[in-house]
Amino acid sequence: TESNQQITHTLEQLKNTQQTLVESEKMASLGSLVAGIAHEINTPIGISVTAASFLEEEIHDLNAKLISNTLSRSYVEKLIVRIGESGRLLATNLQRAADLISSFKQVAVDQSSEACYSFKLIENLNQVITSLKHKIKQVHCHVFIDCPDELSIYSFPGSFVQIYSNLILNSLIHAFENWEGKREIYIDI
């Protein structure tokens, strides 16, 4: 009886240790995702800040010309073109940042929750690729995905995120070390 109790106690300790290790791995993976996403978001946000600053200068110049009564039709026509280009640049980069944040939020939720629901594999995989984009670019690698758009499964998306992330990161770390050929990852589902 005493040996049985010790074995049961040891088994419980092992289960607790295993759960702690799984949670630690998830948190480490999320930390890596956060760093990558922060780096990726920095570019579109920086471009947006520059475009907004340019627009502010253009408005200041327009106001100065208006006050000094030196506003010409050709200046206004050129100004409209410059403001249009800046506006498109601003909208495109803010949308890019929003997409990155959205992708990161979904990956973070999926990785930290144990929820089971129906999801499309291609969307789940694309979110992981987006969140790992920084690391993929660092290694000068290209990821190619072949997966039917409508393929859905009822499962645990967080587990799939973890599997994809681990496989891709392991490939980036180990597969291309001292590799001079093409750096390509093919995922065929």
Image (cartoon, helix red, strand yellow):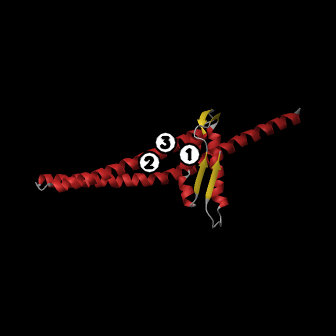
Q: Amino acid at mark 3?
A: Ser
Q: Earlier in the sequence, mark 1 or mark 2?
A: 2
Tell me how far mark 1 sits from mark 3, CA to CA. Answer: 12 Å
Q: Nearer the viewer, residue 118 or 36?
A: 118
Q: Which residue is mark 2?
A: 96
Q: Position of residue 116 (x, y in %)?
A: 63, 32
Q: Residue at x 54, y 40 (%)?
A: 106
Q: Earlier in the sequence, mark 1 or mark 3?
A: 3
Q: Is residue 24 visible?
A: no
Tell me the element at label 3: helix
Q: Is residue 10 visible?
A: yes
Q: Position of residue 49 (x, y in %)?
A: 35, 53
| Quadrant of the rendered image containing residue 178 | bottom right
Dot 3: few (<14), some (14–19), or many (≥20) neighbours within 10 Å? some
Residue 54 shows which numbered tag?
none
Tell me how far mark 3 sits from mark 2, CA to CA. Answer: 10 Å
Q: Nearer the viewer, residue 105 or 143?
A: 143
Q: Which residue is mark 1?
A: 126
Q: Which residue is mark 3?
A: 102
Residue 122 left/right relative to 65: right
Q: Amino acid at mark 2?
A: Arg
| Quadrant of the rendered image containing residue 19 | top right
Q: Of discs 3 and 2, which sits in the foreground?
A: 2
Q: Earlier in the sequence, mark 3 or mark 2?
A: 2
Tell me the element at label 2: helix
Image position of 51 with respect to 20: above or below: below
Q: Position of residue 151 (x, y in %)?
A: 61, 38
Q: Of discs 1 and 3, which sits in the foreground?
A: 1
